[in-house]
């Protein structure tokens, strides 16, 4: 049985535009309110070590602004763990983070970082925070997520989004196979990165996926059509694929 697919909207780049000139405009909190009106199911925000977009106070204000669950993306560091425990978001998605990267490039090596991740995952779960790992669609990483006991994984769809020709089908199959493997083992699979109007439907059609997290494309499209219209169209395309 196919179930409805949730849409989480990443609002990092609203904050990027704000920070380009300083001040308070545009406010990511206003974006969160629009997403709630437009049919989004959640708000995603990545609090980076260098605070290049979302700031600490944004986390609190976003949580207070709507009833939508906040998915806080963060690196597996003591600083970020302390912040997550203080704010208590609905979910934390642990992502890889390199200071020089423009955006998150590739998935987390959960298999190689098990001993580092294990105590962080336990502390978040003890605080009632749902933990997700942002991983590549690889069996080794799904197995690591299972060993860590996380309830959710989010598959990095960047390679699919940038694939051409026959590689598109190969990447899509890889994601579908790993979503099925995760679901079979009781882990809820999500997906995101590089998804657009043009490529979202084959991903949205994967029956085991429960949620897509989409940000950069929607914020960019909002420049031309407005955020509400951009979210509504993505919502419609995802629903049609199911």
Image (tube, rainbow, N blue to C red):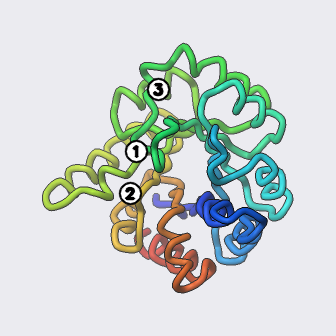
On screen, residue 18 versus residue 96, left or right, reads: right
Which quadrant of the structure image shows residue 215?
bottom right
Task: Identify the residue under disc 1.
Answer: 179
Whether pointer 2 and pointer 1 mark residues with C-beta atoms closer than 8 Å, the reply is yes
Q: Residue at x 55, y 22 (%)?
A: 148
* Above or below, 15 relative to 89: below
* Above or below, 170 relative to 97: below
Task: Identify the residue under disc 2.
Answer: 206
Q: Residue at x 47, y 70 (%)?
A: 238
Instruction: Please provide percent x and percent y for residue 162.
Output: 28, 57
Of the numbered discs 3 and 2, the one sitting upstream in the chain is 3
* Above or below, 170 relative to 9: above
Task: Identify the residue under disc 3.
Answer: 110
Q: Residue at x 70, y 24 (%)?
A: 78
Of the numbered discs 2 and 1, the one sitting upstream in the chain is 1
Q: Secondary structure at mark 3?
A: loop
């Amino acid at each position: 049985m196919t179930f409805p697919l949730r849409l989480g909207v990443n609002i990092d780049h609203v904050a990027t535009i704000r920070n380009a000139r300083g001040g308070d405009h545009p406010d990511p909190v206003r974006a969160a309110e629009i997403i709630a009106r437009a049919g989004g199911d959640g708000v995603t925000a990545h609090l980076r070590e260098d605070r290049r977009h979302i700031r600490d106070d944004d986390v609190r204000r976003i949580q207070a602004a709507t009833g939508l669950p906040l998915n806080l993306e963060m690196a597996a560091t003591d600083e970020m763990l302390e912040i997550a425990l203080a704010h208590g978001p609905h979910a934390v998605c642990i992502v890889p983070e390199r200071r020089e990267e423009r955006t998150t490039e590739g998935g987390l090596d959960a298999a190689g970082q098990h001993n580092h991740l294990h105590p962080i995952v336990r502390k978040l779960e003890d605080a009632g925070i749902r933990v997700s790992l942002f991983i590549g669609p690889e069996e080794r990483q799904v197995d690591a997520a299972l060993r860590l006991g996380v309830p959710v994984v989010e598959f990095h769809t960047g390679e699919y989004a940038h694939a051409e020709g026959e590689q598109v089908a190969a990447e899509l199959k890889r994601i579908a196979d790993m979503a099925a493997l995760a679901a079979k083992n009781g882990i809820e699979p999500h997906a995101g990165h590089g998804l657009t109007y043009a490529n979202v439907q084959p991903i949205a059609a994967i029956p085991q996926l429960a949620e897509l997290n989409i940000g950069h494309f929607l914020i960019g499209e909002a420049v031309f059509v407005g955020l509400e219209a951009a979210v509504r169209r993505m919502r419609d395309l995802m629903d049609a694929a199911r």
